[in-house]
Amino acid sequence: MNRKTRLAGRVVLITGAGSGIGRAVAIAAVARGMRPVLVGRRQAALHETLSLLPGGMGAASVGWAFACDITVPQQRHDLLAELARREGRLDILVNNAGAFHMGPLSAMTDAAIAETFAVNLAAPTALIRDSLELLARSEWPVIVNVGSVNGDLPDPEFSAYSAAKFGLRGLSDALRLELAPRGIRVCYIAPRATDTAPPGDEGVATDMNMSLDQPETVAQMLWAAVERGARSAYRGRSERLWIALRRLCPRLWDWHRGS
């Protein structure tokens, strides 16, 4: 069985599918023969993504969209009820939705802190829990959590965001062990700065001397990781090197970032 036939026909739920990485992941999924369920807060943005899929909005067999806020329990329930009714199972869950607030912690509002943790960590955790029954109906269930290199490499003025992404990485590692007996695989994806929302990535890339990736590059990395059964995937040679060095000598990263 080759890689693409392994993914062909799979039902994949993608959060944050209205733009950026989520949109690119959906387009790449259809190219591999998968059927995406597009989730996001803005119906118009989801329809735009649908229109960009091979076959366009008129091809119902390609996929469908459901506008909801995954931080709201009732809306998660409605989403999964519709998924169960229309598809009967879930093969791949891609937790991609994210919220980004940059700045010194002393200046960050309660609302910004709450949204950062709700969207980046609490909601994906709850959505995984709520999706387990549908994932159990799949012959090859996979959970993909889209984190960030900031989940390994903390940076000044990224305290809340880094903490949330550290948490998502920890969640992925713990669930990989917890769900293995049930045959559910977990893959953690860590992009670096991307040429898309959230705003501010361009400045981050400049400050950290990182290249700016296209969403399509991240999408290809994500599906390649799923196809080969990887535990995780990281963008950037220098970022991977710094992650390894920081694990060996945390103070080296502090020095590099100017502490």
Image (cartoon, grey):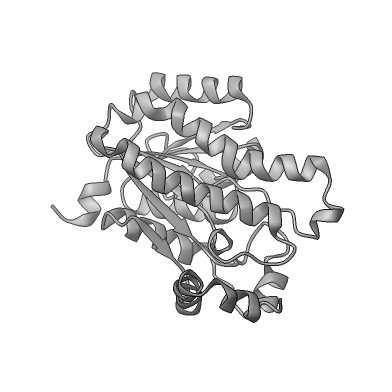
The reply to whether residue 211 is visible in this rendering is no
Q: Residue at x 74, y 54 (%)?
A: 101
Name the spot of residue 75 as percent of width and height, x first. 59, 23
Name the spot of residue 170 as percent of width and height, x first. 47, 48
Name the spot of residue 53 as percent of width and height, x first. 46, 49
Up-down relation of residue 198 to residue 177 (above or below): below
Tell me the quarter of the image containing the C terminus: bottom right
Between 224 and 248, the one lying in front of the other is 248
Up-down relation of residue 31 to residue 93 (above or below): below
Query: On the image, which quarter does residue 115 sit in?
Result: top right
Query: On the image, which quarter does residue 176 sit in?
Result: top left
Q: How many marks?
A: 0
Q: Residue at x 51, y 36 (%)?
A: 125
Task: Spot the residue most to the right.
Answer: 107
Q: Residue at x 63, y 26 (%)?
A: 72
17 relative position to 9: left or right? right
143 relative position to 16: left or right? left
The reply to whether residue 29 is visible in this rendering is yes
Between 227 and 163, the one lying in front of the other is 163
Between 27 and 111, the one lying in front of the other is 111
Q: Residue at x 24, y 54 (%)?
A: 4
Name the spot of residue 63 as percent of width and height, x first. 43, 37
